[in-house]
Amino acid sequence: MLEKRIVVLPQVGVAPKDLYYAQILSSLPPQPPNTSLRKHIHNHITHRSINTLKDNTLLHARPPDIHPSESSLPRKDRVHLARLRCGHHPALLSYQKRLDDRAVNSCPGCNASPHTIQHIMEDCIIHNHARKQHNIHSIKDLWENPVSAVAFLGETGLCVHHTPIRLLDLYLWKLVLWSGSFAFHICKRPCVPQLVGKVLAKSDQVA
Ligand SMILES: [Zn+2]
């Protein structure tokens, strides 16, 4: 079967962004059969981005592949993991120190080391038991063992986990309190006792 190759010729007076898109199009490999052009462009750009990824700043190497089990986690936990994998998590004092020089970058658990994600995942003696319980061995577990890593980080207090049920409970409680408050204000209105009195009077008449 013949493969389709897209050829884009340069044109005079083309806007820079259009030229950029045209260059991407012209760099596309032959479009495989039974694959839409949209999907082909998506696959090509995705693979190109993955292949040109720079070393992770914490690992000083290419990060391992993220284990597929991460997709089972709530979005909020996946955001925690993404931030922790680069050390840019607001709960880390090492990160807070980068933003505000007045912050003290010292582990609140042991006071013996800077508060980094490496320290929490690998060294902090305060978390030895939780680390063993969740089978955590190194910072690479953020990629290779994401479900256990989230459970471990939840115990350390770094990755607070709110389940949808708990949030729902919170909303229900707010609704109950709001309803009670509303009913209280309604009862306080002068017209309500008057109305109640009139109804009672009517019931006496009926009786
Ligand atoms: Zn510590």
Image (cartoon, rainbow, N blue to C red):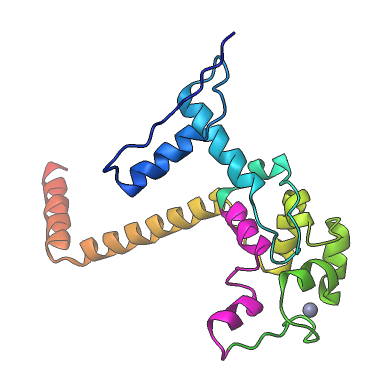
Q: Quadrant of residue 115?
A: bottom right
Residue 110 is situated, as x and y percent measured from the top left of the image, at 80, 83
Residue drawn 70% across the image and 56% down it? 150
Q: Quadrant of ligand 1?
A: bottom right
Residue 14 is situated, as x and y percent measured from the top left of the image, at 29, 42
Residue 130 is situated, as x and y percent measured from the top left of the image, at 83, 64
Q: Which residues are magenta?
A: 76-102
Q: Quadrant of residue 173?
A: bottom left
Residue in the foreground of this view, choosing between 113 and 12: 12
* 19 over 1 or under it: above or below: below
Residue in the foreground of this view, choosing between 5 and 86: 5
Residue drawn 53% across the image and 19% down it? 35
Residue 100 is situated, as x and y percent measured from the top left of the image, at 54, 85
Q: Main secondary structure of the magenta part?
A: helix
> Does residue 145 appear in this view?
no
Residue 105 falls left or right of residue 36: right
Residue 26 falls left or right of residue 98: left
Residue in the foreground of this view, choosing between 12 and 3: 12
* 146 over 100 or under it: above or below: above
Q: How many numbered discs, if any? A: 0
Residue in the foreground of this view, choosing between 194 and 200: 194
> Does residue 141 appear in this view?
yes
Q: Quadrant of residue 68?
A: top right
* 116 over 205 or under it: above or below: below
Residue drawn 73% across the image and 44% down it? 67
Which quadrant: the C terminus? top left
Is 91 one of the magenta-colored residues? yes
Which quadrant: the N terminus? top right
Q: Residue furthest top?
A: 1
Residue 179 falls left or right of residue 117: left
Is 84 one of the magenta-colored residues? yes
